[in-house]
Amino acid sequence: MAIGNNIISLQADPSFEELEAAGGVVQKHADAHTVLDDLFFISGEIPRRTGYEHGLKGGMRFDAEEKDWFSDEGIADERFLMYKGIIMFTACSHAGVVNCAQHAVDSLDGEVPLHAIVGGFHLATSETSQMESTVRDLKRLDPAVILPGHCSGWRAKFAIERSMPGAMVPCSVGMRIKF
């Protein structure tokens, strides 16, 4: 991630080869697919539809062949996981939580209601206008339960609760959630 002129590098993710050497089974999918006998649906690339969800501002990636850093604000490889029509789990929602949720609904032809959204919404450092647009569009999608996690930020959690009273449930690591 670039902050000003400084690039802040996180530890490199393990390579596919390193995962396999440790006993992992790597499956590469560019498109949406299911796993565990169709129990879970994993999205393909998430379409960017909203005008306000642009990815991770300052996002960078290191290209080992070029030995250089390049802008990667779109983070096109982000995915979400769906379960039990429709409970959607996001990571940090760099693709935008509304983009993710709308894609989840569209993946089932809009015939299954959006019951819950669980995960990070990446709104902690967002502009007020983006947060307000996100909350407005989440309300339009009408999920019964919203569990904003780690990177959502207290302002977004407060705005969700104010806009959709009773729908917001605080989410933290180690919680057990039963649907």
Image (spheres, rainbow, N blue to C red):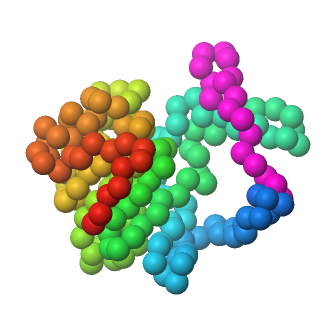
Q: Please report the residue visible at 47 percent of the width from the left and 72 percent of the height from the top.
A: 41
Question: Residue 13, percent across and down?
Answer: 72, 45
For the N terminus, the image quarter is top right
* Location of residue 72 by image quarter: top right
Residue farthest bottom in this picture? 37
For the C terminus, the image quarter is bottom left
Q: How many marks?
A: 0
User: Of 170 and 138, which appears nearest the observer?
Assistant: 170
Question: Residue 152, percent across and down?
Answer: 37, 37
Q: Which residues are magenta?
A: 1-18
Q: Please report the residue visible at 12 percent of the width from the left and 48 percent of the height from the top.
A: 166
Assess whether residue 2 is covered by the magenta stretch: yes
Whether residue 54 is visible, yes or no, is yes
User: Of 49 and 156, which appears nearest the observer?
Assistant: 156
Q: Please report the residue visible at 58 percent of the width from the left and 46 percent of the height from the top.
A: 75
Question: Residue 14, percent across and down?
Answer: 75, 49
* Location of residue 35 by image quarter: bottom right
Question: Residue 139, percent across and down?
Answer: 19, 51
Q: Please say if 63 is above or below 46.
A: above
Left or right of 27 on screen, residue 133: left
Q: Please report the residue visible at 35 percent of the width from the left and 32 percent of the height from the top.
A: 153
* Location of residue 6 by image quarter: top right
